[in-house]
Amino acid sequence: KWMKTDDHSMVGSAQPCLKTSPEIHRTYAHYLTKWVDAYESKTGVKIWGITAQNEPKFYNNSMWEACSYTAEEQRDFIKNHLGPVFRNKYGREKVIMHFDWNKETVVDWANVVLGDEEAAEYVWGTALHWYDGYHFDQVAQLYAQYGKKHHILATEGCTCAYDEDGFPTPWKRGARYLHDMIGDLNNGVEGWVDWNVLLNIVEGQGGKGGPNHAGNFCFSHIHVDSDGNLIVHPSYYAFGHVSRFLPRGSRIISTNFRNAPQAGIEVVSARRKGGGVVAVLLNDNPTIQEVFITLLGATQGLNIQMEPNSVATIEIPPEDIIFAMS
């Protein structure tokens, strides 16, 4: 609190968040390293990277902790304080991500932070959230401009009280994950981090879970009821089609529709590190859809029938690729 402008409370933030003294900014950078060290020491969990600030543009709230930054302020904090402090202490072992906010304005923000060579030297990549929409055009432009040097990671997504009207059923919440992951991965995102995996159901909250110190109750893949029973939702299995079948080291490959794609049919394909190709398909339609899958230049293919509101994964081992191409 004593580092914040006007000694602002931890909840919400003034603008700017931190007092202007360079000593305050440097002290805060050192504080973040101490937090990393303490977390690793107490939990045994190794931290490979942090974001400079969670949701730096969501400061005008009375619910939870916040610290506001403009793109210029975050650029200067990384360039002059956080970057040098982290590099001096950890070398390149731990990384820093910038932004960590909704995609709609990510390119403008990146132009300020990654467009500055001194700041960009300390930035591993861009962190994204999904709460104001999918904005795959922004992701694609970000990758086109900065993807050769900097990574993109989706660092948070969840359906909560404030946006559940758009995703009112368990299937719609599961399809939301697949739609965002497929669109992100096809446009340069390297990984996707969910906000919650398991929550306790909170009575009177319409099936949403917690606990949450700010009363921000949300849905997760698995809920625990008052009797200790696990309730597994469709989003668990939808998420698993990506997390299980596209392991670390997979490389996204382009997927083309021979004809105009059917509405609601989406696909992401990848070549896996150990060989072979995998395709994850989403049918977000209430009707059965016929899909034909083939490799470019192959003499054979596969017709599949996707059930209404379903997800399917197709695995093609290396030996079958050779067979299909012969």
Image: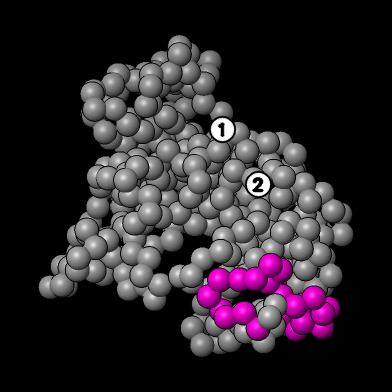
Q: Residue furthest front?
A: 6
Judging depth in this view, the residue of 277 and 2 nearest the camera is: 2
**Which residue in the protein does label 1 denote?**
253
Magenta segment: does it hold 16?
A: yes
Please name the residue shown 32% across and 30% down the image.
283
Is residue 19 visible from the viewing direction of this image?
Answer: yes
Q: Where is residue 208 in the image (x, y as percent from the top left)?
A: 27, 61
Q: Which numbered circle lies on residue 24?
A: none
Question: Disc 2 marks which residue?
Answer: 106
Q: Is residue 40 magenta?
A: no
Which residue is drawn at the image coordinates 56% and 33% (left, top)? 253
Asked which quadrant contains residue 52, the reply is bottom right
Q: As rendered, which of 83 and 297 lies closer to the eye?
A: 83
User: How are the residues colored?
Assistant: one colour
| Camera sees residue 317 | no
Of all residues, the one furthest to the right in this rendering is 118
Left or right, 197 with respect to 274, comes to left
In terms of secondary structure, where does tag 1 sit?
strand
Q: Gap between marks 2 and 1, in whole Å? A: 24 Å
- Going from N to C along the chain, the mark reached first, 2 or 1, is 2
Q: What residue type is labelled 1?
A: Ile
Q: Give the range drawn in magenta.
A: 7-31
Q: Specify the quadrant that holds the N terminus.
A: bottom right
Three-letter amino acid code at the position of disc 2: Val
